[in-house]
Image (cartoon, helix red, strand yellow):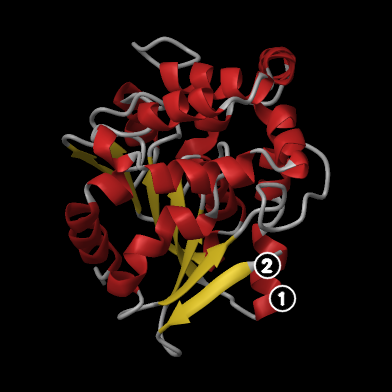
Amino acid sequence: MRYYDCGADAGPVLLFLHGSGPGVTGWRNFRGLLPSFAEHYRCLILEFPGFGVSPDVGGHPMVTAHGAVVPFLDALGVDRVHVIGNSMGGGVGINFAIRNPERVGRLVTIGGIGTNIFSASPSEGIRLLQEFTEDPTRQRLVDWLKSMVYDQSLITDELIAERWQLATDPETLAAARRMYGKAAFAAMTAAMEASDRPMPWATMHKLAAPTLLTWGRDDRVSPPDMALIPMRTIPNAELHIFPKSGHWAMIEAKEAFESTVLAFLSRP
């Protein structure tokens, strides 16, 4: 697995876990935050297998991501971390914190967890993601990217070109289809409904770490009503919603996100 390591040599370690989607990488999710966070923390950005930077190892990319965190930290000799997880990365972070409570100080999630209460499922953003995965065209990528943000000017030609190059890599696209192809998505949904195991959001009461749930008010991928169950069931959770922000709250509300999260992480 590939990763980025920067910031303070000593002191707390901050682990960044990225989300999913065409052309996603941890570096693109979090690079803009590093100047602020690296002043105070050793920052590790993990690139999950199968998303275009770390090699694909087969299987469902979300399952692979859940299994990547412990061996990654063990290989670096890192015992304890704070975690910031965007979307899928937030779910991975919650699972890691529940299973390894002694290894997590504080946890920050950015959208993407919980379940739809009032909004339709799948959401607009997920439907657009499925359409791109089924038939990847440049316009479908643009449509999906625009669903990720409130401020449409953020979807620049440079960003589109950057994401298109990685999203259409054959290995990356094959992994995406295992996760977001319509048949794969339907099969996953059916398997979860038929399973005796509880839904992921039904285990959040087991999360011991102090948790900050952050959300963009205008998130069209994971609408903010999804925050209601995590906010209610995580024992030590608080919720911060950023206005005029979509699924990438850490990018669209960068300064507010940084000040809010740094204050949360620095509490005794």
The residue lying furthest to the bottom in this view is: 10
Q: Which mark is residue 43?
A: none
Type of amino acid at the residue the image marks with label 2? Phe
**Considering only vertical position in the picture, is 174 above or below 122?**
below
Q: Is residue 245 left or right of residue 188?
A: left
Closer-to-camera residue (153/222): 153
Q: Position of residue 162 (x, y in %)?
A: 51, 49
Q: Position of residue 194 (x, y in %)?
A: 73, 12
Give the labeled residue for mark 1: 75
Q: Secondary structure at mark 1?
A: helix
Q: Which residue matches tag 2? A: 72
Residue 39 drawn above or below residue 174: below
In this view, the residue farthest toward the right is 58
- 34 vs 174: above or below: below
Dots 2, 1 in contact, CB < 8 A: yes
For the question of whether residue 19 can be seen, the reply is no
Q: Residue 169: x and y, percent?
A: 71, 43
> Secondary structure under badge 2?
helix
Quarter in which the N terminus is drawn:
bottom right
Q: Is residue 187 visible?
A: yes
Residue at screen point 25% across, 27% down: 218
Q: Position of residue 80 (x, y in %)?
A: 52, 72
